[in-house]
């Protein structure tokens, strides 16, 4: 069930009415209802995948109970590792088994005849990387005694399967989301209105920005050998905004939907393309995953407290693992390694935390220096996204070689240039709105709130009209991160 579908709109209205007008008197009943609604939402894709969520829920709930009743350090470690190995084992089977097997056979072809193992004919369960990491955060935090293990199976089930963020995040920490299921929720009109506003902006990002950019990014990447250098640059540019509009749009819809039901999810994007260096970019891009790897992998490995070798090795580990999390392809590993190379000079010169505040805070325009830094950081990011989008390493290298050729000075050529120009106009409007609202949680959070009513609603209706116009004659497009 896609957020940008009529099915979800009907589903959301029904769930909202039942949640606030039928089961609102009893907390346990509310949580039961969230579990039911979430399982219907997830089962809409394939009901067979519900068994995986149920298994993950029962496993980590039981692990939490075991940790609560065990004080011997050695035994607690064994219990924790059972959770880690089983959770990651399930993830590896569905997501990485074929990749490792194919890579092994490519490296040593004779093994394919020796072992005789074939690739598994399995479908990657949507969202498995997200809810696996979410449940792992629970068991690790319980092990570290940062969180009291729950004895409420229904509340824990709701935490694991909570439908707004189940499929593509944010990857919530148990310390933030789980306690919210213990408290009685009452309807908050202002929070609901703010949630609807964030949903609106998320739909704009997805339908107007991401889906339009996807049309031209796909056309150019899928036919890159026939494109000149300037067209390839434009393709990488379109994909850069496609993936941002798509993923941050999903996060906005998820966070806004959660607010309709009285829940607060963590912020997942903070205007990353206005970053002045790569370190700032990664503090603002997919924040829930970046902080997850920081807290549960980077810091346990020693972080940046050791010598130069430890700093370098830990940086490469966290970026490569982050890349591999995105998919079973060498392109994602290359993308992660490239970002590590971008990041290392900042870390080694202790400049990785130079830009903490949002750029040009309290000002209309950035300084000339900040503008150059934004453009250079954006350029590095666009270049790295080529590896992320490419079909394989060979395709990425062919794409890059096509850019760095004499044809980069030629006029871009591909079908439907008029449509691409309209998309560029959408992007200009989008960038301006994002810049104006860059100090907020999302771009239109407070935009026009202090204006007269007709101006404020005129702006909202303009957004709605653009969304409707941009979606005319087009089918609903899935979200990129569903494949991860």
Image (tube, grey):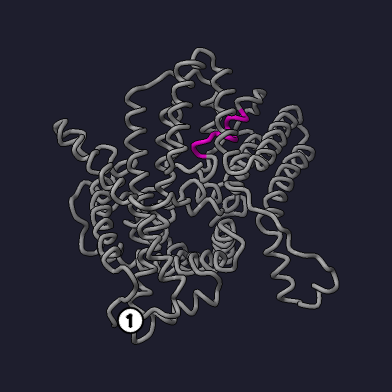
| Residue sitting farthest toward the front | 473
Q: Is residue 160 magenta?
A: yes
Q: Position of residue 209 (x, y in %)?
A: 34, 54
Please rate how many residues cluster around mark 1, counting C-alpha atoms within 10 Å: few if below 14, some from 14 to 19, many from 20: some
Q: Is residue 121 magenta?
A: no
Q: Nearer the viewer, residue 274 or 260?
A: 260
Q: Residue at x 71, y 75 (%)?
A: 106
Residue hosting label 1: 408
| Residue sitting farthest toward the right | 114
| Location of residue 141 (image quadrant) | top right
Q: Position of residue 166 (x, y in %)?
A: 54, 40
Q: Position of residue 343 (x, y in %)?
A: 46, 64
Q: Is residue 147 above or below residue 185?
A: below
Q: Is residue 206 above or below residue 345?
A: above
Q: Is residue 362 left or right of residue 188?
A: left
Question: What segment carries the magenta color?
Answer: 156-165
Q: Nearer the viewer, residue 179 or 475?
A: 475
| Location of residue 350 (image quadrant) | bottom left
């Amino acid at each position: 069930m896609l957020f940008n579908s009529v099915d979800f709109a009907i589903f959301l209205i029904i769930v909202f009415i039942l949640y606030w007008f039928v089961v609102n008197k009893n907390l346990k009943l509310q949580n039961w209802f969230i579990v039911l609604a979430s399982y219907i939402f997830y089962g809409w894709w394939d009901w067979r995948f519900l068994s995986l969520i149920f298994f993950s829920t029962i496993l980590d709930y039981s692990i939490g109970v075991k940790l609560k009743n065990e004080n011997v350090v050695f035994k607690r470690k064994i219990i924790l590792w059972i959770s880690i190995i089983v959770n990651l084992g399930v993830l590896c089977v569905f997501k990485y088994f074929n990749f490792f097997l194919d890579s092994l056979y490519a490296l040593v072809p004779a093994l394919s005849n020796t072992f005789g193992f074939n690739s598994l004919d399995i479908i990657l369960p949507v969202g498995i990387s997200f809810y696996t990491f979410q449940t792992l955060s629970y068991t690790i935090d319980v092990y570290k005694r940062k969180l009291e293990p729950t004895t409420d199976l229904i509340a824990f089930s709701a935490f694991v399967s909570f439908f707004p963020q189940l499929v593509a995040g944010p990857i919530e920490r148990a310390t933030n989301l789980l306690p919210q299921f213990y408290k009685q929720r009452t309807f908050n009109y202002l929070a609901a209105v703010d949630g609807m506003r964030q949903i609106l902006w998320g739909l704009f990002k997805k339908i107007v920005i991401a889906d339009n950019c996807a049309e031209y990014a796909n056309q150019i990447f899928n036919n890159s050998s026939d494109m000149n250098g300037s067209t390839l640059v434009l393709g990488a540019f379109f994909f850069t905004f496609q993936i941002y509009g798509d993923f941050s749009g999903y996060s906005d819809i998820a966070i806004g939907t959660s607010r309709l039901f009285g829940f607060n999810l963590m912020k997942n994007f903070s205007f990353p393309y206005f970053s002045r260096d790569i370190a700032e970019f990664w503090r603002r891009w997919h924040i829930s995953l970046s902080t997850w790897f920081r807290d549960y992998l980077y810091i346990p490995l020693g972080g940046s407290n050791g010598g130069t070798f430890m700093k370098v090795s830990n940086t490469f580990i966290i970026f490569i693992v982050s890349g591999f999390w995105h998919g079973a392809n060498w392109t994602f590993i290359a993308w992660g390694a490239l970002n590590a190379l971008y990041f290392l000079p900042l870390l080694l010169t202790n400049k990785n935390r130079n830009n903490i505040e949002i750029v040009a805070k309290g000002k209309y325009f950035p300084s000339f220096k900040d503008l150059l830094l934004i453009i250079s950081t954006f350029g590095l990011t666009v270049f790295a996204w080529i590896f992320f989008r490419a079909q394989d390493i060979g395709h990425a290298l062919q794409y890059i070689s096509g850019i760095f050729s004499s044809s980069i000075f030629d006029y871009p050529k591909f079908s439907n240039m008029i449509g691409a120009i309209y998309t560029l106009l959408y992007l200009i409007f989008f960038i301006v709105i994002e810049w104006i609202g860059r100090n907020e949680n999302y771009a239109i959070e407070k935009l026009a709130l202090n204006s007269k009513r007709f101006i404020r609603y005129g702006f909202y209706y303009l957004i709605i009209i653009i969304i409707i116009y941009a979606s005319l004659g087009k089918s609903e497009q899935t979200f990129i991160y569903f494949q991860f």
